[in-house]
Image (cartoon, rainbow, N blue to C red):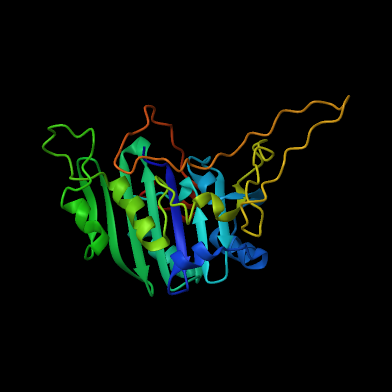
Amino acid sequence: MLPNISVLWFVDCDDPAAELRSGVSIDPAQTTSFIEKAFANTEITAIGTSDLGAAVGGADNRVFAAHFGSLAVLAGHSLRTADPNELTAYLADLGVGHTWALISVDPGADIGCFARWDDGDLHRAFAGTSTSIKIDAGLPHPFEGPYWAGEHPQPDAGDDPLALPFHPGALADAANREWFGFGFRESEPSLDPARIPVTVYRVGPDDGRDQFVESSVPLTGDAADVPEVATPEAGAEETEPIERVVAPAATFDAETGDQTDAQQERTPGPISRYFGFRGRL
């Protein structure tokens, strides 16, 4: 199954995958400065902590962010765009990292997209659906070879003559695995996205659901100490239980490209709305 995820990475180290494997901790001050730049002149409220795996399938008005010092991440459906070029000026204005990467997979729209910028220049970008290529800019990276060679075919392509030799969403996830050491479809034992801590933000006015966020990873990045849910005392007033945020299972099939049955209605995401991106899917 393809994950529903959009992530921007900001890299200022030689090996981000090694940094993540070694264990990362949120820098609160840098994260606050980072998110304030990312959503300047926008109402944004920190509502809890969670893990990057919880960003899969998150609500449109939720953003997951963390600054780890030499590496930062920003995730949320509002980051979707059909044209990575539209993000270049926005990323440059943030002034975080010398390498930027976009990973965006939207099963409901049948599209996958990834891009990489180095020193402000877009060096590689690809976006497409199961039957069409929307953007193919720059030279392919070596990890793409097996996909273009047909080694990861779409399981439901059948005899469709227009079907690509792979699903773009699978290729986008492969880009995340190549550059950051893990995929959202299959979590390597050495690096599970559920072990990457993030702060969860609400963008826009209070929607009455701020309490529906669970911190499954503490700010230290140590996933072993999962907070326990307190048991109400006898006679205490009952409240609606907290809705658990579940990280993606580690047993996703790397070769399947199943799409979700229902296509969810989409509204313009926060970044698209405030910065005028035209390519919002």
Whole-percent x and y of residue 144? Answer: 24, 57
Which residue occupies the extreme front position in the image?
Answer: 189
54 is higher (above) or lower (below) than 102: above
Q: Quadrant of the N terminus?
A: top left
Whole-percent x and y of residue 90? Answer: 45, 63
Front-most of residues 224 and 140:
224
Whole-percent x and y of residue 36? Answer: 60, 61
Q: Please say whether residue 133 is visible from this viewpoint.
A: yes
Q: Is residue 117 left or right of residue 132?
A: right
Front-most of residues 3 and 126:
3
Q: Is residue 84 left or right of residue 189?
A: left
Whole-percent x and y of residue 203? Answer: 59, 48
Q: Is residue 48 left or right of residue 3?
A: right
Q: Residue at x 45, y 54 (%)?
A: 7
Q: Residue at x 57, y 50 (%)?
A: 51
Q: Quadrant of the C terminus?
A: top left
Q: Is residue 194 left or right of residue 172?
A: right
Q: Residue at x 43, y 32 (%)?
A: 265
234 is higher (above) or lower (below) than 267: above
Q: Please say whether residue 83 is visible from this viewpoint.
A: no
156 is higher (above) or lower (below) than 220: above
Q: Residue at x 41, y 66 (%)?
A: 100
Which residue occupies the extreme right position in the image?
Answer: 235
